[in-house]
Structures are given as C-alpha cells and as structure tokens.
C-alpha cells in the first residue's frame, strides 16, 4: 500500500474532483510523466550499488531509483522496516537523492537576484546559514520548494528533481532581463546528493570528517564545505526531509559517491533506505511533496507556509518590500496576509488509508469541501494519516469530516501537523 504512489500509472489517476486546487498542473504532470516514460531513465552514481544491495528500482523524476531494498545484503529491507529504522534511537538511514538539482549562484548581486525568485530573506542569511524557501510564479503560485544556503563566496541551492529544468528555465528568463552581476551554475554532472537521516546521523558522519570537525556546534539549517573520508570538495548541510536530525551530503560524482555511501553503510547503525520510506517519513513529519501537496496553483498562505517569508510577521522585510515574483497576489500593502478560501490541513481518524485525490466532505457527507493530496499508513502511529486542502472555514483542528473512500463515506477529522514530533537538532546552550 505504501508503494502505490510510485507504481500507479498515469491512466489509473484519470478521475479528478471538480474541487481540486490543481487540476491543470496535475494534468500537465501526467503528460510529463507519460512523455518521460518514453525517454531513457537517467542514473545516479549509485545505480549499480543500489542493485547490488537489493534495491527494487522504479522510475522517479526521470531517474531510476530504489523504492525499497530487499534480500540478504541489507539489515532491514522493506518500506516498514526502513521507515522504523530511521525513527529509532541511535540509527541512521541513507537515501540517494541525487535526482535533485544542485545550483550555485555567483556574483556580487547573487543574493539580490535570488530574492526576486524566492520568498525568503536570503540577504539576511549569515555565512553558512540557510533556509527552506519557495520559488513563486507571477500569480504567487509555488513553482518549487528549495533549500538555500549562503556559502560565503556563493549561494548553494537545492531544488526538486522533477522541477529542476523548469526552475532553471524560469531563472534564466529573469536573468536575461536582470541588470546585475550574477551567474547560475548547474552542477549537473559534477556532484551527487545523499541524505543521511536519523538521530544517529551525526555520530556516523563525524567518523568520516577531518579531525577536530565538531558537528555538535553545527546548527540545523547550516552548511559547510568539507572533506569526507579523504574526499575533497564535499559539502554538508544539516537538514533533511524526515523530521529527524540529519544531513544532506553533496559529493563529487562517480567513485567518490560510491566510496562515501559504502563507508556510511558499513556502520552497523546505518541502513540504505528507498523512496517508499522517504515518502512515509516526510508525511509523518507534515512535510509537503511537490506535485502532490504544492504546485503552481497553491500560494504560500494556502500551503500554511507563511513562515518562509521570514520572522517579524507583517513587519518582516520581505513582506514589507514585496519585491519577489507574485508577492502582491497574497500579501496586502501593509504586509498582512490576504485571506484564502482554502488551506492545507492534516487528517486522521479514518480506519482505512485515504490516498491522493480522495474527496473531503462536510460531516453530513453532502457538501464537497476539499481533497486529499497525500495519504499513507503511519508505521509509527500504526494508523492512517493524510494531508490535503479544505475550505478555510472548516479547517479548525478536530473538525469532523467525511472522506469518500471506495464510494463509501468514512469518518475522519482535521488535525494539526506534524503527526509525529520532529527531532531537529539544536545546539546545546
């Protein structure tokens, strides 16, 4: 059941509710998926490594990637075991996320330009500090979500694999009209990306770092260039998409990536983990999957992501200056948020998992009020969870609702997220 979102063909998802907030982009996405199916899948540096470990390979974002591992060459294979390993005390999970796009921005005006593309306070980032931000279109819709770090001499940006070429075309269009000193560098063939996630991540990674490198002083959402297991030109950022402590590790492509992945997985506390567990982990953490929970018809306020605009409420610099693409569509002149008809919410209480496109009705089962965008069975809570969009007037926590599952009305209710408490690292005081 947890694998359905990766194995479903485009044809099986043909029916869409008239309520859905993103029918146009979903149709476009299915068209892109069908076109991509005719193209050879790209491979990461770890492709054969995954197969040797028993990785069950599937198409994802134009790449061949493991959805799970099985066989005698892994400690805990299968989505459920891989998921629970990542949540276990002292353990760590290794993900291959090399399909994601890595971009570096150069030039003295790099921060000013990037701020025109995203909603976050990039000019205010201290050296080696970063943030999660959103790329917006002219209508204020979310083109992509991205992690951005001020690396000192350059800005390091990671975007979603399914959107990286669209993102770069969007950036280039604006670069062509920009009068300033800034260049965009796409690290297409040079670098791969790994994610080491779980409470044991720091202990495992520290063994491969130069002597004297102290991860205990490295805060969440900070990054550094470093050497890993003797391999130079690596970069680590303390972040991830599981709700756990962890690191995204940028490594030189080829044998260097294989060496680092192999060394990490040689630790008894590390387990290779696939896309299936990555999806259930991020959903438990209340985190959005672009293309499901976010798209170009959803703005940051609808997505309950206003915090990405920076601290200070209406007085935050980005909310006052409003100099990023589409700002006026969801911000008032004074920086306050415009009211939205719908918002993103969590859903629990149903006895059966409710998948993407499941319709949400009022408690009487009469009025269509929303749609689920992501749903799964939570291995930690041992019950179904979901997120979706609902009429704002019905979005208060504990509001009873009905879900239409297999043509039957099922009881559920609105809840806050995350579903499972996050364990992001904080530097001891």
Image (cartoon, rainbow, N blue to C red):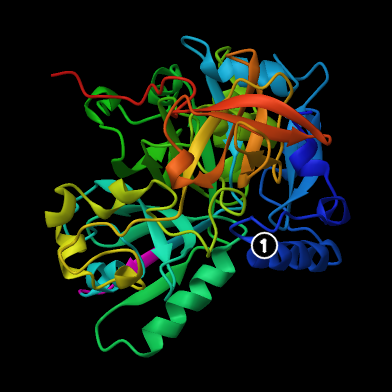
Q: Is mark 1 on a helix, strand or loop?
A: helix
> What secondary structure predominates along the stretch shown in magenta?
strand
Q: Which of 141 and 237 is in front in this view?
A: 141
Q: In this view, does 337 lie above or below 231?
A: below
| Residue at 14 percent of width and 48 percent of height | 312
Whether residue 48 appears in this view of the structure is: no
Residue 298 located left or right of residue 112: right
Q: Magenta includes 117?
A: no
| Residue at 53 percent of width and 65 percent of height | 296
Where residue 292 appears, as percent x and y from the top left, is 62, 49
Where residue 71 appears, as percent x and y from the top left, is 83, 19
Q: Which residue is the site of mark 1?
A: 23
Q: Which of 315 and 242 is in front in this view?
A: 315
Query: Magenta span covers which residues?
Result: 104-108
Question: Total number of numbered labels?
Answer: 1
Q: Nearer the viewer, residue 198 or 308?
A: 308
Where residue 159 appears, as percent x and y from the top left, is 49, 57
Label 1 Cα crowd, 10 Å radius (few <14 / some 14-19 / many 20+): some
């Amino acid at each position: 059941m947890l694998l359905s979102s990766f194995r479903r063909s485009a044809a099986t998802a043909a029916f869409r509710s008239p309520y859905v907030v993103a029918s146009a982009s979903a149709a476009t996405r299915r068209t892109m998926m069908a076109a991509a199916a005719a193209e050879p899948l790209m491979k990461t540096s770890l492709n054969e490594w995954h197969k040797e470990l028993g990785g069950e390979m599937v198409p994802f974002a134009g790449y061949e990637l493991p959805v799970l591992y099985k066989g005698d060459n892994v400690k805990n294979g299968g989505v459920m075991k891989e998921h629970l390993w990542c949540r276990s005390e002292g353990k760590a999970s290794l993900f291959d996320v090399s399909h994601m796009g890595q971009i570096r921005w150069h030039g003295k005006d790099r921060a000013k330009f990037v701020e025109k593309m995203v909603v976050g306070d990039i000019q205010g980032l201290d050296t080696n500090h970063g943030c999660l931000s959103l790329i917006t279109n002219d209508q204020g819709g979310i083109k992509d979500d991205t992690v951005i770090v001020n690396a000192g001499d350059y800005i390091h940006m990671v975007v979603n694999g399914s959107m990286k070429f669209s993102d770069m075309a969007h950036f280039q269009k604006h670069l062509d009209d920009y009068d300033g000193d800034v260049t965009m560098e796409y690290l297409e063939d040079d670098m791969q990306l790994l994610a080491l996630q779980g409470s044991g991540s720091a202990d495992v990674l520290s063994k491969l770092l130069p002597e004297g490198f102290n991860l205990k002083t490295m805060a969440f959402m900070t990054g550094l260039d470093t050497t890993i297991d003797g391999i130079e030109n690596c970069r680590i950022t303390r972040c991830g998409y599981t709700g756990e402590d962890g690191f995204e590790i940028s490594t030189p492509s080829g044998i260097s990536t294989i060496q680092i992945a192999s060394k990490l997985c040689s630790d008894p506390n590390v387990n290779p983990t696939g896309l299936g567990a990555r999806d259930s982990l991020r959903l438990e953490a209340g985190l959005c999957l672009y293309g499901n929970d976010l798209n170009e018809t959803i703005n940051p306020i609808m997505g309950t992501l206003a915090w990405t605009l920076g601290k200070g409420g209406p007085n935050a610099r980005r909310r006052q200056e409003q100099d990023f693409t589409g700002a006026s569509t969801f911000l008032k002149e004074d920086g306050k948020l415009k009211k939205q008809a719908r918002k993103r919410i969590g859903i629990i209480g149903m006895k059966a998992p409710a998948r993407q496109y499941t319709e949400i009705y009022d408690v009487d089962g009469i009025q269509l009020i929303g749609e689920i965008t992501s749903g799964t069975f939570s291995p930690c809570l041992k019950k179904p969870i979901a997120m979706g969009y609902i009429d704002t007037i019905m979005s208060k926590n504990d509001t009873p609702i009905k879900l239409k599952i297999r043509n039957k009305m099922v009881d559920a209710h609105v809840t806050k997220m995350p579903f499972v408490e996050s364990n992001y690292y904080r530097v001891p005081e």
